[in-house]
Image (spheres, rainbow, N blue to C red):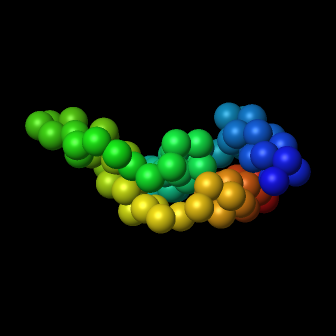
């Protein structure tokens, strides 16, 4: 797990220096995987009103419900590595 945590931390740093900005769906996937890996399942009420960005983020995160933290970390690392090329 310690090795995976180190890879995850490196992927977080790498994600901030990608050559090309990912599309919105990929950014949502990165966000959701990060939140699932660091906070577990989404909790609380879904944002309402006209905050469409917050709703999209919450929905992406909630879609990963039940995914173990280590699996979310590995998926995040894999996705960032694919984006790095």
Asked whether, in this view, residue 1 is left or right of residue 56, the answer is right
Q: Is residue 30 above or below residue 53?
A: below
The residue shown at (51%, 55%) is: 29
Q: Position of residue 80 (x, y in %)?
A: 70, 53
The residue shown at (11%, 37%) is: 49
Q: Position of residue 26 (x, y in %)?
A: 52, 55
Between 8 and 78, the residue placed more toward the observer is 8
Q: Which residue sits furthest right?
A: 3
Q: Is residue 63 above or below residue 3?
A: below
Evaluate whether residue 52 shows in this view.
Answer: no
| Quadrant in which the C terminus is drawn | bottom right
Between 85 and 55, the residue placed more toward the observer is 55
The residue shown at (59%, 61%) is: 68
Q: Position of residue 50 (x, y in %)?
A: 14, 37
Count of numbered labels shown in the rendering: 0
Between 24 and 76, the residue placed more toward the observer is 76
Evaluate whether residue 70 shows in this view.
Answer: yes
Asked whether, in this view, residue 64 is left or right of residue 77, the answer is left
Q: Which residue sits furthest left?
A: 49
Q: Is residue 38 above or below residue 41?
A: above
The residue shown at (78%, 46%) is: 5
Can you tell which quarter of the image residue 17 is in? top right
Q: Position of residue 62 (x, y in %)?
A: 37, 56
Asked whether, in this view, residue 68 is left or right of residue 51, the answer is right
């Amino acid at each position: 797990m310690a090795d995976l945590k180190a890879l995850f931390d490196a992927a977080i740093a790498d994600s901030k220096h990608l050559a090309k900005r990912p599309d919105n769906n990929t950014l949502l996937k990165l966000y959701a995987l990060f939140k699932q890996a660091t906070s577990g399942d989404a909790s609380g009420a879904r944002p309402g009103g006209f905050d469409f960005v917050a709703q999209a983020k919450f929905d992406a995160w909630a879609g990963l419900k039940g995914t173990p933290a280590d699996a979310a970390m590995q998926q995040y690392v894999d996705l960032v590595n694919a984006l790095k090329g």
